[in-house]
Image (cartoon, helix red, strand yellow):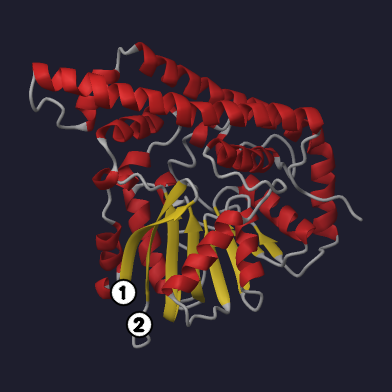
């Protein structure tokens, strides 16, 4: 069996990564829960008694917590556990890098499926991807130090399952689970039960694990994944080929692709929009409208932190991500009205949706719409 591309920790590396996942889980649930109780049951009543109506905004909540020792502990542990996460997955990436690159080069020379990888040097990558270490990933999505560099992809892939475990969403399976893609495909069937897609586009596909789910759920479809981060695309192509799944990957801007009008029946994304900007959100939605065939569906999964459904405490802790965790558009995205944005992009308001779907302890925000047969 030829060497494969994929994140593969040894026993000790996996143990360290599991510890970091457990630490982040403690911070996310036990410690943050304790802090929320303090905020709701003590700090807010005391502040309202002193100055009624003074907690009117997220900034007021931030000011109330700023000097609180428990909040400062939560901040410190959250920040440093993120550093520990990247350090722990880098152990695996660095140890296996030469073997991973050799496997990728073998795949380029001897493809294992008819899936493809197309890179384009002329692509101009925009902020925040070009300017920000998203999630504080060292070097960002674009770090390259050698030919066919896979480091950014390996490191990102290594964090996915660790992060899910920290959020109580562990799959219990091998690294590289496609469970979110499977979830999105199931939701697609809910919103468009009659749709049998022949061509699927995954926007912002990243390291590609979830892209594989669409081919597995809809085997008759040709599936394409696009991203603007080249090292992640290399990993995605190598991983798909190693898994024996035929996917076409291409380096493109999701807001300005090279595809012809009406090229796809189903357009999807997972946690992409909150890593863009307001202008890019609008470009991507307009491009999605252009690319969908009549009768097709656009379906996007993203963070469920819209202020209208978040208590003041959660608004404060979520906005902390903007200031301290390489998430410059986290709050900006959450404050956008996606049904309005979809309508502005061309979707019939009566055929759009922006809803929440719960999976175990997690909830996800799904938004999108169908294109009428006559449009």
Extreme left residue here?
Answer: 52
Per the image, label 2 sits on a secondary structure element best described as loop
- Residue at (17%, 17%) from the top-left corner? 46
- In the image, 115 versus 163, the foreground residue is 163
- Above or below: residue 64 compared with residue 247: above
Quadrant of the drawing holding the C terminus = bottom left
Mark 2 closeness class: few <14, some 14–19, many ≥20 residues within 10 Å: some
First in sequence: mark 2 or mark 1? 1
**Hey, which quadrant is residue 331 in on the image?**
top left
Of residue 59 and residue 55, the one placed in the foreground of this image is 55
Could you tell me which secondary element the residue under label 1 belongs to?
Answer: helix
Which residue is label 2 attached to?
A: 372
Is 58 on the left or on the right of 87, as rendered?
Answer: left
User: Is 179 placed left or right of 126 in the picture?
Assistant: right
Q: Residues within 10 Å of mark 1 (few under 14, many from 20)?
A: some
Question: Please, is residue 329 above or below residue 29 in the view?
Answer: below
Which residue was labeled with disc 1? Answer: 351
Spatial separation of the CA atoms under disc 2 and disc 1:
8 Å
Residue, far right: 1
Question: Horizontal placement of 143 versus 318: left or right?
Answer: right
**Residue 203, horizontal then vertical, whole percent:** 51, 59
Query: Nearer the viewer's eye, disc 2 or disc 1?
Result: 1
x, y percent for residue 343: 26, 67
């Amino acid at each position: 069996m030829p060497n494969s591309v994929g994140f593969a920790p040894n026993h000790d590396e996996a143990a360290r990564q599991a510890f970091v996942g457990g630490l982040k889980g403690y911070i996310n649930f036990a410690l943050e829960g304790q802090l929320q109780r303090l905020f709701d049951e003590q700090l807010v009543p005391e502040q309202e008694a002193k100055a009624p109506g003074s907690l009117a905004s997220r900034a007021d909540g931030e000011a109330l917590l700023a000097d609180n020792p428990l909040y400062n502990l939560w901040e410190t542990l959250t920040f440093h556990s993120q550093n520990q996460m990247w350090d722990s997955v880098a152990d695996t990436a660095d140890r296996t890098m030469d073997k991973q690159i050799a496997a990728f080069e073998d795949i380029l020379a001897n493809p294992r499926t008819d899936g493809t990888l197309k890179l384009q040097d002329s692509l101009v990558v925009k902020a925040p991807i070009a300017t920000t270490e998203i999630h504080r990933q060292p070097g960002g999505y674009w770090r390259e130090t050698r030919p066919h560099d896979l480091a950014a992809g390996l490191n990102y892939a290594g964090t996915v399952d660790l992060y899910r475990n920290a959020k109580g969403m562990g799959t219990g399976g091998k690294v590289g689970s496609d469970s979110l893609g499977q979830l999105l495909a199931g939701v697609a069937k809910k919103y468009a039960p009659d749709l049998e897609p022949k061509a699927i586009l995954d926007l912002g596909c990243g390291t590609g694990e979830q892209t594989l789910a669409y081919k597995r759920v809809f085997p008759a479809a040709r599936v394409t994944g696009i991203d603007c981060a080249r090292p992640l695309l290399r990993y995605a192509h190598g991983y798909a080929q190693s898994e024996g799944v035929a996917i076409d990957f291409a380096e493109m801007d999701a807001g300005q692709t090279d595809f012809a009008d009406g090229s796809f029946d189903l357009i999807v994304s997972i946690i992409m929009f909150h890593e863009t900007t307001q202008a890019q959100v609008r470009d991507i939605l307009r491009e999605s409208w252009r690319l969908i065939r009549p009768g097709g569906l656009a379906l996007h999964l993203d963070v469920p932190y819209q202020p209208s459904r978040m208590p003041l405490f959660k608004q404060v802790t979520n906005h902390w991500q903007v200031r301290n965790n390489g998430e410059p558009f986290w709050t900006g995205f959450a404050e956008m009205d996606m049904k309005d944005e979809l309508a502005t992009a061309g979707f019939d308001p009566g055929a759009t949706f922006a809803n929440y779907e719960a999976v175990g302890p997690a909830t996800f925000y799904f938004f999108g719409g169908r294109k009428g047969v006559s449009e």
